[in-house]
Image: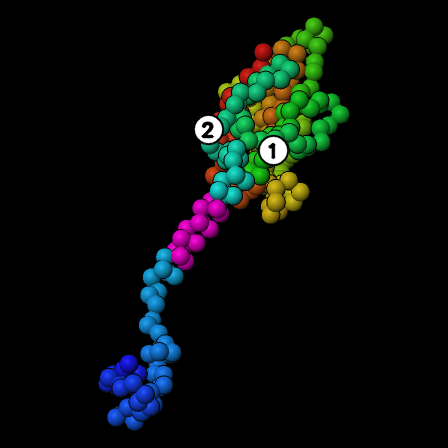
Amino acid sequence: MRCNACGRELKDGQMFCQCGASAGYVGPDSLNLYPKKRSALPLVLGMIAGALLFALLAFFLISSATKGKRSVTDRASWERVSGPGYSITIPASMKDSEVIENSADMRSLLQKRSSEAAIAISAMSYDPKALGSISRKKLEEIIKQRMPAVDENGHEVNLQDRGSMFYYEYEHKETGIFFGADSVHVVDAMCVGKTAIYDVIIITPEKKYAEYEPYIFSWIDSFQTE
């Protein structure tokens, strides 16, 4: 056998080595008190793999939660919607929801909203046999009677001509339509059908109106009556 301290060969029955160590000496190598340091690479790779797995899981959850929810500005998601005597192209992401309370002479035809915009379409019926066809001049007079003179900030509200429709717009203090918005921008457009005057109201958060304006008027321009 050999000495565990110095490695010298020991004779049988020899109790001590020349180095002074006992034959039964157990050195640090035997106890493995100072093992070799393990590489940190497997740990690092494991942490990277875990982080990638977490990122993929988060992406999947977010994708699942937002699947089918597309912005109202995404023209690819718009669809043609028809109702009694009218049709209009609007975002498919809008859901049925009460937006406004109509006056007694208007009947609600459509009310939809999303987190970005809301639209309400209503109609006021008339008898063309009794009243005759309503001219654009007569429609302009009717709208001016209904529209506010100024908005809540004191800005003058003016009626504007747009193709087959007249419209006016104004800012309104409102906190109950869009989360986090304390005021909304209202665009109110009207046109004459064969047996009804149609009113198309589109509402967005005031702070987002500049961004949504071209899309709002695309919806209005798409409105058609029979």
User: In this rendering, is residue 188 above or below 85?
Assistant: below
Q: Is residue 52 left or right of residue 137?
A: left
Q: Which residue is at a point 61% across and 42% down the rendered structure image? A: 178
User: In this rendering, is residue 136 above or below 20?
Assistant: above
Can residue 21 be seen here? The reply is no
Q: Amino acid at mark 1?
A: Arg
Q: Quadrant of the N terminus?
A: bottom left
**Nearer-the-camera pick, 22 or 155:** 22
**Nearer-the-camera pick, 44 or 60:** 44
Alpha carbon of mark 2 to alpha carbon of mark 1: how far? 16 Å
- The residue carrying mark 1 is 113
Q: Amino acid at mark 2?
A: Arg
Can residue 31 be seen here? The reply is yes
- The residue carrying mark 2 is 75
Q: Residue extending furthest front?
A: 12
The percent position of residue 24, horizontal first and vertical second, equals 36, 85
Mark 1 burial class by Cα count in 10 Å: few <14, some 14-19, many 20+: many
Q: Residue extending furthest right?
A: 104
Provide the secondary structure element on which disc 1 rests: strand
The percent position of residue 16, horizontal first and vertical second, equals 31, 92
Q: Quadrant of the C terminus?
A: top right
Mark 2 or mark 1: which comes first in sequence?
A: 2
The percent position of residue 14, horizontal first and vertical second, equals 30, 89
Q: Residue extending furthest top?
A: 129
Residue 175 in which image quadrant: top right
For the record, the magenta segment spans 46-59
Q: Is residue 30 left or right of residue 131?
A: left
User: In this rendering, is residue 15 above or below 50?
Assistant: below
